[in-house]
Image (cartoon, helix red, strand yellow):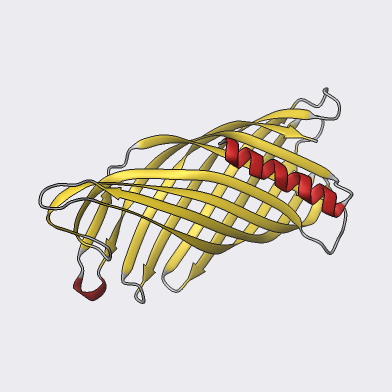
Amino acid sequence: MKKILFTFLCGAVLASNTLADIARVEIGVGAWMQDAKGSASYTQSGANGIYTSNEEDSTQSYIWALIKHPIPIVPNLRLEYTSVEDSGIATGRFKEFDIGGVSTAMSYDMKQYDIIPYYNILDNTAWITLDLGLDIKVIDISYDVDPLSPFLGYSGSETVAIPLLYVRTRIEIPTTDIGLEADVKYVTTGDSTVYDVRAKIDYTLDFIPVIQPAIEVGYRIQKLDIDESSIDTVIDLEFSGVYAGIMLRF
């Protein structure tokens, strides 16, 4: 977490030095209570590997930063980090390993780094904000398959990047310090769809000058529905649950 915070702060400082005039900076941290479910299968070259989630709950941290500036042709920037974890049962033969006829425990962790350049279409116009942009979601995947005789176990990792459309809308409720906000990251191609959707309510303590703290509570659902014949892999995973955190507005 310290490394992630340092990276975000360095990014904010670099952006401020580069763009000179920063209209607004926001930073948030919190926890996402996830309910994981789903399955995956691998069938390339006669393989028959199957993974099935145990559908257990877990809580993971998240952090985000938003940097907005007044230069129209240059996109604003939002950075995000979170992680999703799951464990389940695997059996059969996969690309890198062959479990054989037994079933054994498997766990994985997907650390996600979202880099989102976006344009501010509406900026609190009639209390409404609308942002449109592109999300480059970089996912660091690591997984462990437990040994179970005669299978000796296996650990691996890989990194993938997924481009998604980004849309964010926000409504400030007049005469209050309450905001309603939702954002969608979405892409579909062929038989595959990936999306990451959030909706939240937040309350800002605007009586504090310069730096305004706030609290946020919301619900997030992330879906990976991948069915690509070219890689003989079918993935149907979902992570959903309530999240809550604190924010700072500069």
Which residue is pictured at 70% across the width and 38% down the height?
27
Residue placed most toward the observer, 195 or 46: 46
Q: Which quadrant does the C terminus fall into? A: top right
Which residue is pictured at 40% across the width and 35% down the height?
58
Q: Which quadrant does the N terminus fall into? A: top right
Q: Relative to residue 23, is residue 224 drawn left or right?
A: left
Which residue is pictured at 22% across the width and 50% down the height?
153
Residue placed most toward the observer, 197 or 180: 197
Residue 176 appears anywhere in the view: no
Residue placed most toward the observer, 158 or 101: 158
Q: Quadrant of residue 47?
A: bottom left
Whole-percent x and y of residue 157? Answer: 39, 55
**Residue 37 versus residue 191 in the image, above or below:** above
Residue placed most toward the observer, 162 or 169: 162
Q: Relative to residue 190, is residue 11 drawn left or right?
A: right
Q: Quadrant of residue 26?
A: top right
Whole-percent x and y of residue 197? Answer: 55, 50
Which residue is pictured at 49% across the width and 47% down the height?
221
| Tag count | 0
Whole-percent x and y of residue 178? Answer: 72, 32
Residue 113 appears anywhere in the view: yes
Q: Relative to residue 228, is residue 50 drawn left or right?
A: left
Q: Relative to residue 86, is residue 112 drawn left or right?
A: right
